[in-house]
Amino acid sequence: MTIPAGWTARRPTLDDVPAILAVVHAADTFAVGYPDFDAEDVRDALTAPFVDMARDSWLVTDPDGAPVGWTILSNPTGVGREFVEVYVDPHRGADLRAPLLARLLERVAERAAERGLPALAVRTAVFAPETRWAGELVDAGFTRLKRYIRMTRSLADLPAEPAPPAGVTVRPLRADDESDLRLFHRIFDTAFRDTPDYEPVEFDQWREQLPSDGKVWDEWFVAEVDGEPAGALQSSDQALDQDMGWVRTLSVLPAHRRRGVGAALLRRAFAVYAAKGRAGAGLGVDLANPTAPVTLYRSVGLADARWTDMYERSVPAAGV
């Protein structure tokens, strides 16, 4: 990895969280217009399952010790594809991004060999202003795979929650009841199995890996049709700094799709967000999702806010 003379690349520790956050905030402000990470997010990334700070992350500082770049690998399930994140200060660290990516790809090759795999798919995201990053990814062998859309709506003009369709009921998740948590997971797992990138995880692993910002239990809901489980909605507080409620996942079982279940769950979530004084609501949608949720989301007042492209390449295992 080549860095300017006098600059330092080293492995981070949890003591570096404030320094890392400064880099991430600078990168996020350039990419999306505002800081989209907090200190807890940094700690979660550094201590996540299947992440080794001493091998899977780098922190780069300039001669004055100021942070200018941070990288990390992640793999939430420990199986399937890897994700790489390369954050740089856009004004002082732009030249670091390509060499830091190269170092991460070397580590992905090592991880493939450690897992006994011939190769690993690796992904990373590009936001609209990051044209240089997109070019560097192409030069490194990546291709654009698909696009995600962030959708939002104001809650200031939210109409009264309408009655759900006949037979459809929506209730809060009973988070202190393990059987209800297992039901929620079963709905989520079943509903997402027909999406291209879903990697199933068992209940215990799913519960253990729920991020701290995902456990806003009074904003999780279960939908039933004639008393039978039909759908589930998970919120998170990841957009509270933007005064928004956030839908992390919306799951509707195949047998109950296009019967108003998803819309009823979304409207209930929006009503709860509004009752808490939130100014808006939002979610992210994968345009490659075959269930075509964009039509549903627009029907409940959500509109496109920005896009993110996902890039991918295959990395052969070290020694192959």
Image (tube, grey):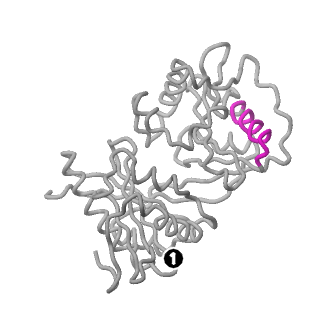
Query: In this figure, which residue is indicated by the disc labeled 1?
Result: 90
Residue at horizontal 42%, vertical 65%? 86
Look at the image and give the residue range highlighted in magenta: 264-278
Residue farthest toward the left in the current orientation of the protein: 319
Considering depth in this image, is 110 or 65 the residue closer to the camera?
Answer: 65
Q: Position of residue 297 (x, y in %)?
A: 68, 43
Residue at horizontal 70%, vertical 24%? 170
Secondary structure mostly taken by the magenta-highlighted segment of the chain: helix
* Residue 199 left/right relative to 5: right
Please name the amino acid that badge 1 sits on: Pro
Disc 1 is placed on an element classified as: loop
Residue at horizontal 42%, vertical 64%? 16
Considering depth in this image, is 161 or 100 the residue closer to the camera?
Answer: 100
Q: Residues within 10 Å of mark 1 (few under 14, many from 20)?
A: many
* Residue 52 left/right relative to 235: left
Quadrant location, the N terminus: bottom left
